[in-house]
Amino acid sequence: RTDFPTDTAHEQVTFFQDPATGLKAIVAIHDTTLGPALGGTRFYPYADEAAALKDVLRLSRGMTYKSAIAGVDLGGGKAVIIGDPATGKSEALLEAYARFVQTLGGRYITAGDVGTNSDDLDVMGRATEYVVGRNTSAGGSGDSAPMTALGVFQGMRAGAQEKWGTPSLAGRVVGVEGTGKVGYQLIKLLLADGASVVATDVNAAALDRVARDFPEVKIASSVIDLELDVYAPCAMGATLTDESVAAITAQVICGAANNQLAHPIVEHDLGDRGITWVPDYVANGGGLIQVAGERLGTSADDVRAQVEKIFATVVQILDVAKRDGILAGAAADAVAEARIAAAK
Ligand code: NAI
Ligand code: K
């Protein structure tokens, strides 16, 4: 027995299984108004099929909004493979999965997500043409972190303009939480713009790389609780909680992490405290723009130009929020919905 949420009118949800390889997967196509549905394949040990279905319905709907707000002519979809990637992943399973993706005839295009990487996508590419995010050696566009970081930086500049009247981070103290692929690239952009950066990570090797390449960066055991102008969550989601928001000193929050709000009410608390929050799915759309470009035949220069437009999009969202007296998250959803409605 499965309860389909009535507020998420998905176009198509398909369950695939292949007993020979142990594959159990669900592909959810939420909306193809703007184009074929693009979204990553998550490989995760869900407790049961109902939990997997719930997640894929939620995530695919999110992709519709993410593509629309990024100005990408693709719809929203997502897939989940039920299993533990550490023990259950095999080339045969990935190929079986990719054969199923191929049967959808291009209505769904997969990318990577939690539990799948570019090497896995290379394997899938043997059995389906509907895959993006492969390694450059396999015809993909490679690491998306530089474009994701550029988009976060542009969103942050828009937040700075809203808060301080100038789209510059010069002289601002920016706390970067997570110095992995995106955080590292973001630090480079921030330093070039004249910001003072303080960074943290739980992984010593990631911090060592920052300390070696950017000696001017201060290293801290955490950043969210420091005196900051800007907080950039680039590690895990859900760091904006009742407690952290009550104590935070940053006036602008913009980062790459998905689902930064622990729950929706937190955004009201940020608003009450006069803090400008750039919605995560708007700020971190640069990687999506890059991999979508593989399908749409976008040049690297045009990808970069489109990522830079995240600045203008965030300015628009913050203007709509102010004009309509709503929060930035709702304003972003409204801008995305307007784009889909216009295409209908
Ligand atoms: P990554 O795995 O390369 O880096 C994440 C870093 O965060 C790691 O160095 C890890 O040690 C650190 N970390 C984990 N928990 C932490 C904690 N509690 N405190 C401080 N540091 C912690 O991942 P990547 O690619 O840099 O992505 C960063 C975030 O942005 C992730 O949430 C990801 O989902 C999101 N994102 C990434 C995109 C991309 O193109 N790479 C696109 C859109 C979103
Ligand atoms: K991702």
Image: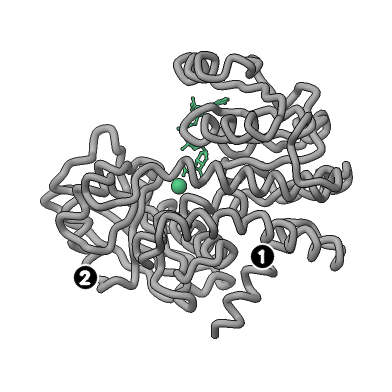
The amino acid pointed to by label 2 is Thr
Residue 309 position by quadrant: bottom right
Q: Which residue appears at 57% of the width and 41% of the height?
A: 257
Residue 103 bears which disc, if any? 2
Furthest-left residue in view?
A: 20
Q: Position of residue 19 (x, y in %)?
A: 15, 53
Q: Is residue 238 above or below residue 18?
A: above
Q: Position of residue 110 (x, y in %)?
A: 33, 58
Q: Earlier in the sequence, mark 1 or mark 2?
A: 2
Work out whether residue 279 or residue 247 is closer to the camera in this orientation and state it: 279
- Is 137 placed left or right of 256 in the picture? left
Q: Position of residue 76 (x, y in %)?
A: 46, 66
The amino acid pointed to by label 1 is Asp
Work out whether residue 205 or residue 172 is closer to the camera in this orientation and state it: 172
Q: Is mark 2 within 8 Å of ligand 2?
A: no
- Is 239 placed left or right of 121 in the picture? right
Q: Which residue appears at 71% of the width and 33% of the height?
A: 231
Q: Is residue 28 above or below residue 122?
A: below
Q: Which residue appears at 84% of the width and 45% of the height?
A: 163
Give the Cα distance between marks 1 and 2: 32 Å
Residue 266 visible: no
Work out whether residue 100 or residue 50 is closer to the camera in this orientation and state it: 100
Q: Position of residue 78 (x, y in %)?
A: 41, 59
Residue 333 bears which disc, if any? 1
Q: Residues within 10 Å of mark 1 (few under 14, many from 20)?
A: some
Color style of the picture = one colour
